[in-house]
Image (spheres, grey):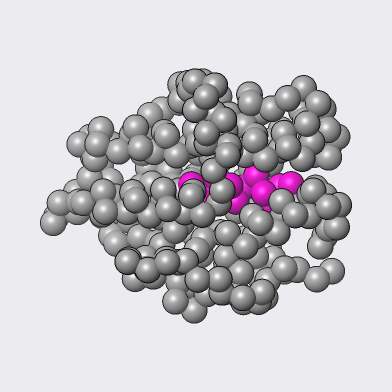
Amino acid sequence: MKLLLTSTLSIFSMVLFAWGPTGHRVVGEIATEHLSKKAKKNIAVILEGESLAMCSNWMDFIKSNDSYDSLKSWHYVTVPELEKYHHEGEMKGDVIQAIDRFIYELKSGEFSVDEQFALRCLVHLVGDIHQPLHVGNGEDRGGNNLKVKWFGKSSNIHRVWDSGIIDNQKLSYTEYATWVNVTAKDQVSKWQSDGTMKWVEESISYRESIYNIPENGNLGYDYNYEHIEELNLRLLQAGVRLAGILNEIYG
């Protein structure tokens, strides 16, 4: 079995998660609500009854298996400040290349592994690219090196965006999805027409705001209040866009 990628990006090497389990499940749940009946039926067969929400964390869970180490660079991309994205080549892959690859595989039926693998990866990676710190600046491992206190506990800014803010809402993933899954039909169509580079540009646009933290690094209610709408929008956009891709393939 030949995997797509065999090395990581030297300027942004890291092991991280994008959204926590709840965040990824929110994306999967929102996507499910925007699927056509035909797409839902076809996807249920491929995933053997597993929901998009529950398969969404598979790519993070398998990080504990060394045989999947070559997948680690699929979760992120580096775009330094004031620079444009540069294609890193077939052997250095990133989240943009991985998403495009799996969309191609699912449309063409030409799988590097199998259809279930490709679908599980796509569900996860569409979530990843909408977490702004997975479009990193190349300086701090996507915020993993920027240490902060989250409600008094040691953390880093990446983890705050992965799970800190989401978990602070004290909602199940289904409750969270219901809360944020509100948008007009014309907005759904607009988001679904945007390509992956638009998603990247959006994530970059959040970085300045994300890094606007007090010198003492103490984050809590104020930071939650300032960023919850931005974070929820990214979860909603990820779910809606994932559904658009899957409807095109399976609907």
Q: Is residue 129 magenta?
A: yes
Could you say which quadrant of the image residue 55 lies in? top right
Q: In this picture, which residue range is highlighted in magenta?
A: 119-130
Estimate the x, y position of residue 242 in percent, counting from the top left.
62, 39
Estimate the x, y position of residue 170 in percent, counting from the top left.
41, 27
Q: Residue at x 84, y 69 (%)?
A: 1
The answer to whether residue 194 is left or right of residue 234 is right
The answer to whether residue 166 is left or right of residue 194 is left
Q: Is 244 drawn above or below residue 14 in the view shown?
A: above
Q: Is 61 drawn above or below residue 32 in the view shown?
A: below
Note whether residue 218 is visible. Answer: yes
Q: Is residue 133 magenta?
A: no
Estimate the x, y position of residue 101 in percent, counting from the top left.
70, 59
Q: How many marks?
A: 0
Q: Main secondary structure of the magenta part?
A: helix
Could you say which quadrant of the image residue 46 lies in? top right
Note whether residue 49 is visible. Answer: no
Q: Nearer the viewer, residue 201 or 120?
A: 201
The answer to whether residue 40 is left or right of residue 23 is right
Q: Residue at x 52, y 24 (%)?
A: 186
Estimate the x, y position of residue 189 in percent, counting from the top left.
57, 30
Q: Nearer the viewer, residue 216 or 29?
A: 29
Q: Residue at x 66, y 74 (%)?
A: 90
Q: Quadrant of the C terminus?
A: top right
Q: Nearer the viewer, residue 186 or 81?
A: 186
Q: Residue at x 72, y 33 (%)?
A: 247
